[in-house]
């Protein structure tokens, strides 16, 4: 279920006007392999978004997940403070 939420947030980042707040950046960290299936249409959109940028598909997905998690925390804090 969590994986589906992350994929949906990635798709929203690509499709929404708020994607201007999400900046693609090159980054290298210690990693572990995980298999994730993506809808073909989402893969095509991600590949288009990263074309000509110094970032891999995996790097983009990691950054999008980090962005999603950070913004989920912000949304949760807003709910608590409301």
Image: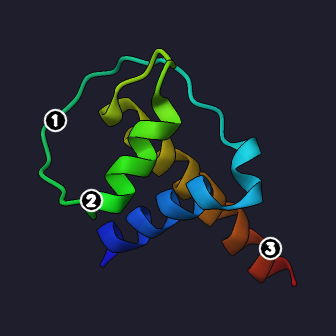
Distance between the Cα atoms at labels 1 and 3? 32 Å
Residue at image position (74%, 70%) is 77
Residue underneath mark 3: 78
Residue lying farthest right?
82
Residue at image position (31%, 67%) is 3
Task: Give the left or right position of residue 41, taking residue 27 as reference.
Answer: left
Q: Position of residue 63 (x, y in %)?
A: 48, 38
Residue at image position (71%, 70%) is 75
Q: Is residue 78 above or below residue 53?
A: below
Distance between the Cα atoms at labels 1 and 2? 23 Å
Q: Which mark is residue 66?
A: none
Q: Earlier in the sequence, mark 1 or mark 2?
A: 1
Q: Position of residue 18 (x, y in %)?
A: 75, 55
Task: Give the left or right position of residue 16, taking residue 38 as reference.
Answer: right
Task: Give the left or right position of residue 80, taking residue 70 as reference.
Answer: right
Residue underneath mark 2: 40
Q: Earlier in the sequence, mark 1 or mark 3?
A: 1
- Say which of marks 1 and 2 sits in front: 2
User: Helix, strand, or loop for circle 1?
Assistant: loop
Give the quarter of the image for residue 20.
top right
Q: Mark 2: few, some, or many residues within 10 Å (few <14, many ≥20)?
A: few
Quadrant showing the N terminus: bottom left
User: Helix, strand, or loop for circle 3?
Assistant: helix
Quadrant showing the C terminus: bottom right
Q: Are marks 1 and 3 in contact (CB under 8 Å)?
A: no
- Say which of marks 3 and 2 sits in front: 2
Residue at image position (65%, 58%) is 71
Q: How many marks?
A: 3
Q: Which mark is residue 32?
A: 1
Q: Position of residue 52 (x, y in %)?
A: 50, 18
Distance between the Cα atoms at labels 3 and 2? 34 Å
């Amino acid at each position: 279920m969590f994986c589906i939420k992350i994929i949906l947030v990635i798709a929203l980042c690509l499709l929404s006007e708020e994607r201007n707040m999400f900046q693609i950046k090159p980054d290298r960290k210690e990693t572990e392999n995980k298999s994730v299936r993506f809808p073909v249409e989402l893969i095509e959109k991600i590949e288009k978004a990263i074309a000509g940028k110094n970032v891999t598909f995996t790097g983009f997905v990691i950054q999008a997940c980090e962005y999603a998690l950070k913004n989920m925390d912000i949304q949760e804090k807003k709910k608590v403070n409301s």
